[in-house]
Amino acid sequence: MARAPAKNSRRQGDMDPRTRADYSAIIDRPPLDLPDGARLVVWPLIAVENWDPAGPMARTVLSPPGGQTHLPDIPNWTWQEYGMRVGFWRLKAALDRHDIRATLCLNGSVCKLYPRLAGAARDAGWEFQAHSYVQTPMHLLADQRDAIRRTIDAIGDFSGAKPRGWIGPGLTETLETPELLVEEGIEYVGDWVWDDQPSELRTAAGVLYNIPYSVELNDIAIMLLQHHPARELYDRFMDQFERLYAEGAESARVMAFGVHPYITGVPHRIKYFERVLAEIAAKPGVLFWTGDEILDWYKAAKAGPERAAG
């Protein structure tokens, strides 16, 4: 049964999203410094989602015969499920070769349904980042607060630490989502793809930090929406890296990329992901950090040496 749209505490139009933060031109900011003279943080996110086989699929790769969708949608559900069974392990092996701890961006329900996968990420010291409880836009949830709490509790119970970060399914937020996240203990989001450095969002409940994410360094956009050949992942990731690496000599930059096990973890694409990691890891002055590490660095940098030392 379809869920009713979430009730907002503000009417549409009551808030311009730009009021969440003052406009800031990157050329006007004081330099941001990274430890040991590093110039760039690379933030790898592995997105793991729970698709309910009893309902319509979040995405499809195969159109139904005659345009009529039937449930269960076996070809499209198993296409995604391949990532849980096989693709994730290719991505993890590539990261392990370079001792990179990634951020696992996961639906809370993944902890219960796929404990082998979630356990491998936990045991490898990855960050667990909340991605709602199931893969449903925030606008369609009848009770956002309940979904946020269920997600935080599920991840906290499984991993031993409550998540500090959040990315909404499809980067979706309603007008009240930032307040709810802060009230429930979330410290940062990645939904606001408007910068190459972290920023602060104003909410009625306090500051919510935003860490730079990207809708373009994402295999959904590259492969499923724009229909590029597999090598585009390598070309785009490395083009982005080269520019941010150069700019980072003056002031630190953050480069995030998001991949999904059922897309990038397949045999005909994985080598491009492996090449990206190998070439970036060989560069001096690059830090592979999780979201919580980026958050702690940025908060300390903004506080200044005196406050940070105290």
Image (spheres, rainbow, N blue to C red):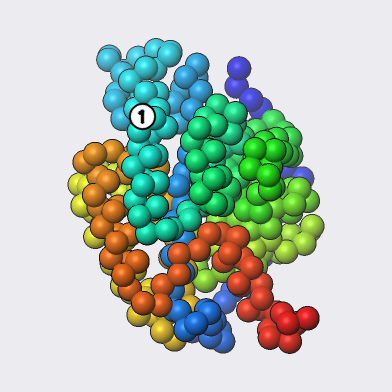
Q: Position of residue 199 (x, y in %)?
A: 60, 69
- Residue drawn at (25%, 52%), measured in percent from left and top? 272
Amino acid type indicated by mark 1: Tyr
Q: Residue at x 68, y 84 (%)?
A: 304
Q: Position of residue 200 (x, y in %)?
A: 65, 67
For the C terminus, the quadrant is bottom right
Q: Indicate left or right for 9 with 71 as reference.
A: right
Q: 129 and 69: which one is in front?
A: 129
Is 54 drawn above or below residue 126 in the view shown? above
Task: Find residue 122 and report its image quarter.
Answer: top right
4 or 310: nearer the viewer:
310
Q: Position of residue 184 (x, y in %)?
A: 76, 48
Q: Residue at x 45, y 79 (%)?
A: 38
The N terminus, quarter of image: top right
**Residue 97 can be seen, yes or no:** yes
Q: Is residue 20 left or right of residue 126?
A: right
Q: Is residue 258 above or below residue 24?
A: above
Vertical order, 169 against 50 (above or below): below
Q: Residue at x 33, y 66 (%)?
A: 280
Residue 44 picture location, percent across and down: 44, 56
Q: Nearer the viewer, residue 248 or 284?
A: 284
Looking at the image, residue 78 lies above or below residue 149: above
The quarter holding residue 107 reads top right
Q: List the residue tagged with mark 1.
A: 82
User: Looking at the image, how many numbered discs can be counted on the residues?
Assistant: 1
Residue 99, by quadrant, is bottom left
Answer left or right for 116 relative to 201.
Answer: left
| Other-residue count near label 1 (Cα within 10 Å), few / some / many at <14 / 14–19 / ≥20 | some
Q: Is residue 138 visible?
A: no
User: For the residue labelled by badge 1, is the local secondary structure a helix, a strand or a loop?
Assistant: helix
